[in-house]
């Protein structure tokens, strides 16, 4: 594939930035990849693994001369990073971020960036339950969505160029309005994560059921919750603090629905339960048909797990 | 492996019974496998696939001469099946069931069975989101737990023999008191399923977020919920109706915990969220160490999903 950017600066060197670096190298999408992370240990790891061409001691140093800067830090840290790098950005550079919340990032980052720099917020819908510099891999974005939420009057050429990079690492790109993005993600990601965290927390508090029993017998549904609930705590704290309204809205709907089902259980209303459980099957079928998942039993997981 | 039973009768021919039949054939654990299902279509399918040696038009016919009878029907149907087969059971036969709830099955089945028949309730912690005669496969039980909940005074030789069968199909066997089983399962399976059903239902009700968006972007956490929520509606209706007390208990704890997190989000209490999310990671690590899961990113799923 043809090179898309001459010099890419990655601010933050965790799962997403690391995977971007691996993928850009594999597909020769960037001439040089510069990196910075707040933690010296992470910087050392990134240099050792070698997914960046240069590691810098400050974000300001890392962005110098870059035609693309990627903010890959927790959502709550984006504003401070933007403020720090702003005076050092090359004229005409593109700045994007990979945060899971978009409106809050736009509010925090936008005001710091100088005229002539193209800020195009984005969010790759890809990840695993692992984090840190050792967790990245080149195929993370393949066949995953990468949403971009351009601001009014965004430069079309800069947007198209960024899109070429995301498509180059294997993603499918969609554009979305920032507020709508935050609501959609509250439904498909943020609220499910909070629920998974909660259920895992409940299992941990029980006295009559030992933790070893919960762990031993987790294959029956609980395991998928623990995977979700193992994700990076800082990232998720920031997601909930910054996508507060949409998350509280969906959570409110969730508890209402749950109480209706809870009442049906208490009252022994089997018809209600049966109808509800039948309806939810259709959504699952839709996901398989949309190609977002496999129809293989248990996701085609190795049987040994 | 050596044959454990001469003639096994499977009542119900869905995912669990079909998988047992496939596995018993592969490991030569049964001399003859007889089968019955209520639906003529299922009986035809089982005969066509060939995982049973004989298909019968009634449960009473199927159990004749069997030294092992496996009740593999929804929990709510167990009592009626037991009543129907009771007069036709061979003296000294073992009867087991594979229901996800144990005390309710014991209460429904036990009273019907004649003296001299060994009733040893059991529950394999294995399954997929698929159901019906075409969904079974021989390796479903490999390295999965199969819990048995023997009644007071259960025959030791009969229990040991049943255990040999379950180990023969690849399972690890544990014994548990029925009431404790129902509580443990409420934590690791029943409540997580209800929560997943609820979250999928919420996604379906929203107007501002289209169903196609939910489906397209489901990879970010929601997908695991839809897998869980795609399971057999009849089976799950019966689970909640018959494990009512334990499920309501765990659900109550869950909503309490959720409200505390919801309040932390509303109040912007990041420290509380961070600490909570950090604690839940430890449980996940425990599950990986216990060998119930893989440490590979995203469960080692094929990247194309």
Image (tube, coloured by chain):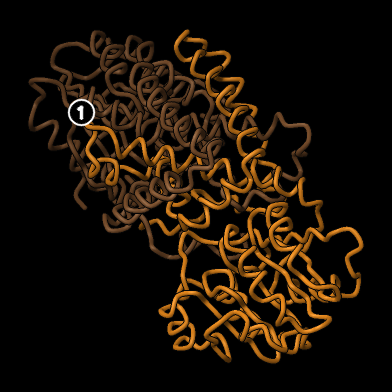
Chain colours: A orange, B brown
Question: What is the tally of numbered marks visible in this picture?
Answer: 1
Q: Where is residue A146 in the image (x, y as percent from the top left)?
A: 71, 62
To which chain does the residue with label 1 belong?
B
**Depth check, front residue: B178 or B194:** B194
Q: What residue is shown with label 1?
A: B149
Give coordinates of residue A7: x percent, y percent.
71, 88
Confirm whether residue B227 shows in the render: yes
**B97 relative position to A292: left or right:** left
Residue occupying image coordinates x 60% and y 52%: B220
Quadrant of the drawing holding the C terminus of chain B: bottom right
Spot occupied by residue B205 in the image (x, y as percentages of width and height): 71, 29
Pick whichever, B170 or A137, lies toward us: A137
Secondary structure under the numbered disc 1 in the rendered image: loop
Q: Is residue B80 left or right of residue A72?
A: left
Please tell me which residue is depicted at 15% across the width and 37% down the height of the picture.
B161
Residue found at x 13% / y 31%: B158
Q: Which residue is drawn at 62% across and 78% down?
A: A10
**A196 sits to left or right of A219:** right
Quarter of the figure with residue B233? top right
Callout 1 environment at 10 Å: few (<14), some (14 to 19), or many (20+)? Answer: many
Within the image, what quadrant is residue B227 found in? top right
Which residue is nearer to you in this view: B15 or B105?
A: B105
Q: Visible in this render: residue B28?
A: no
Horizontally, residue B288 falls left or right of residue B136, namely left
A163 versus B152 height, above or below = below
Please tell me which residue lies in front, B146 or B17. B146
Q: What is the x, y in percent for residue B118?
A: 17, 22
Residue A6 to residue B111: above or below: below
């Amino acid at each position: 594939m043809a090179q898309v950017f001459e010099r890419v600066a990655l601010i933050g060197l965790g799962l997403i930035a690391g995977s971007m670096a691996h993928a850009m190298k594999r597909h020769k999408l960037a001439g040089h990849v510069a990196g910075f992370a707040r933690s010296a240990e992470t910087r050392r790891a990134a240099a050792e693994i070698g997914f960046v061409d240069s590691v810098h001691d400050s974000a300001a140093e890392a962005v110098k001369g870059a035609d693309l800067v990627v903010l890959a830090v927790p959502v709550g840290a984006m504003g401070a990073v933007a403020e720090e790098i702003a005076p050092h950005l090359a004229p005409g550079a593109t700045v994007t971020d990979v945060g899971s919340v978009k409106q809050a990032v736009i509010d925090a980052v936008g005001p710091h960036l100088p005229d002539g720099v193209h800020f195009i917020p984005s969010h790759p819908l890809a990840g695993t339950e692992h984090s840190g510099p050792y967790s990245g891999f080149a195929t993370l974005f393949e066949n995953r969505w990468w949403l971009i939420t351009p601001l009014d009057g965004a430069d079309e050429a800069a947007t198209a160029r960024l899109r070429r990079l995301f498509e180059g690492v294997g993603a499918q790109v969609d554009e979305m309005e920032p507020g709508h993005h935050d609501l959609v993600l509250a439904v498909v990601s943020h609220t499910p994560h909070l629920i998974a965290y909660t259920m895992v927390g409940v299992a941990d508090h029980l006295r009559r059921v030992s933790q070893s029993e919960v762990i031993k017998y987790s294959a029956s549904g609980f395991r998928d919750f623990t995977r979700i609930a193992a994700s990076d705590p800082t990232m998720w704290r920031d997601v909930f603090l910054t996508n507060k309204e949409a998350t509280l809205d969906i959570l409110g709907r969730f508890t209402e629905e749950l109480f209706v089902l809870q009442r049906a259980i208490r009252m022994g209303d089997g018809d209600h339960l049966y109808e509800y459980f039948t309806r939810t099957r259709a959504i699952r079928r839709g996901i398989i048909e949309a190609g977002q998942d496999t129809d293989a039993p248990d996701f085609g997981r190795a049987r040994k797990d």
